[in-house]
Image (cartoon, helix red, strand yellow):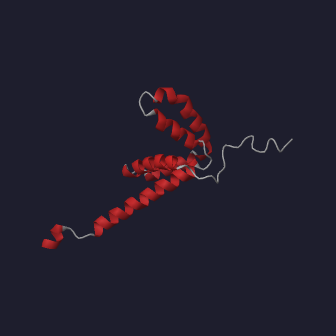
Amino acid sequence: MFRHLHNAFSTGSPFSPPSEEQLQLVDRLAGEIVRRRLTTPALATLEMSRPLNFIGAQAMHFFAPVVNTMFDAGTYEKFAKFLERRDAIDVLMERIEYHNAVASQQTTEEDSAPSASNENA
């Protein structure tokens, strides 16, 4: 009897990688978070809301009819499906940290490059 209940409450395997389409959505969101310099608050909020990510995804499905009047319905639905994954918060935090590291590296490279005004002096 317990064999049949083995996966009864499973919300997905933590080992199955996100699809390419899901990663593109996450990268777009992570890029916007970093561009707006909200990395630290976003990571803190995600870490605190980790136990609620599945409930949050269900709330997104509930509010979809209202939100779809303002945003692209397909993208919103795909992101809500992504949040149903147990590893969604981890993937999102990882991508935010990656984009933040890339942005920091670009800023460092720009700051260390000699400017034209310094060369003429």
Quadrant where the C terminus sits is: bottom left
Residue 66 % position (x, y) = 48, 26
Q: At 16% across and 73% down in the image, what residue appears?
A: 119
Residue at 47 percent of width and 46 percent of height = 25
The vertical placement of 42 against 81, above or below, is below
* Extreme residue toward the left, this view: 120
Residue 33: image location, x then y, percent: 42, 49
Instruction: Give the mark count.
Output: 0
Residue at 48% from the left image edge and 48% from the top image edge: 26
Give the side of residue 93 with respect to residue 85, left or right. Answer: left
Q: Is residue 8 above or below residue 120?
A: above
Query: Residue most toward the right?
Result: 1
The one of 114 and 41 positioned closer to us in this rendering: 114
Q: Quadrant of the N terminus?
A: top right
**x and y percent of residue 71 in the render?**
42, 33
80 vs 113, left or right, is right
Q: Nearer the viewer, residue 116 or 39?
A: 116
Residue 24 visible in rendering: yes
Asked if residue 121 can be seen in this view, the reply is no
Residue 93, given in percent of the width and then of the height, sits at 52, 53
- 120 lies left or right of 42: left
Q: Residue furthest front?
A: 20
From what the image shows, is residue 10 above or below residue 15? above
Quadrant of res 81 = top right
